[in-house]
Image (cartoon, rainbow, N blue to C red):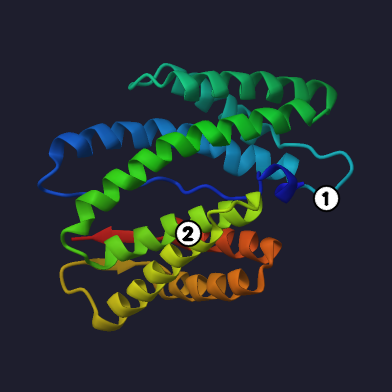
Amino acid sequence: MRLASGAGLALLLVGACRAADAQGTEASDEALTGKLNLYVYCVNQVSRQVLESVVDAPTVTDPIAERCLSNLEKGAGTRPPLVALEQAGTAYARALVAFRKDGGHGALEAADTALRHAIDEVQHTLDEHALARLEQGGGLEFHTRRVVARAEAMVKAFVAGDASIPRVMGEFLAAARALDIALANGDPETAVSGPISLLASSARNLIRHANSGSVPALVEEYNRMVGYWNMLTWRR
């Protein structure tokens, strides 16, 4: 189910990076980040419990379902207004309520796909803003964030069987090599805590799976990379 719908890709808990020369955009992106993560919770928690379950009658635990519904209600009233995201969240909430009543997950799967698409649109904007703020310094945080963004594009292209695979694969290879070089050289201006070496190893595994063309292995490894990314803490 996860590959047929594309719903198997984990989502990043978005973190707005900090840059002294982009305070206006940074403040706007921090507001977007807070709003977006309300919706990301539902996809990472509810959808994972229901749509990736191997049992015949999947369920979602009440605390997670209630938090998701609360997040979606809060998100609709949180600035900045994002009509597409809010509408997708409303549809997801309706589908979740229906699922808890009758156990049918068809509507929830469709709502999940629509919500992921809306999240992707906002997250892409945030990723590009973050990369632009970090690119001038070219430090470790930039290279790490870029390799995760390029990995996402590559895995999605493989899942969709898209004609862009050679291009996005080349972009990911370049980003992965640059991250390895940055790790080898060190970055005295940036301190990071968390499994960054495991993230770099995951990037190398992605290269191996891309070369073999194994889509399930790519999805699994990308999800592992996202988990490592979400555990990183940057300090300047």
Distance from Cα at disc 2 to Cα at disc 1: 32 Å
Residue 83 placement: quadrant = top left
Q: Which residue is mark 1?
A: 54
Q: Residues within 10 Å of mark 1 (few under 14, many from 20)?
A: few
Above or below, 188 against 224 in this view is: below
171 or 233: nearer the viewer:
171
**Mark count:** 2
Above or below, 183 against 4 in this view is: below
Residue 155 placement: quadrant = bottom right
The local secondary structure at tag 2 comes to helix
214 vs 173, left or right, is right
Q: Residue furthest right?
A: 56
The answer to whether residue 81 shows anywhere in this view is yes
Mark 2 or mark 1, which has the lower sequence index? 1
202 or 55: nearer the viewer:
202
Q: Which residue is mark 2?
A: 168
Q: Position of residue 42 (x, y in %)?
A: 58, 35
* Amino acid of disc 2: Val
**Which numbered tag is attached to residue 171?**
none
81 or 53: nearer the viewer:
81
Q: Residues within 10 Å of mark 2 (few under 14, many from 20)?
A: many
Q: Quadrant of the C terminus?
A: bottom left
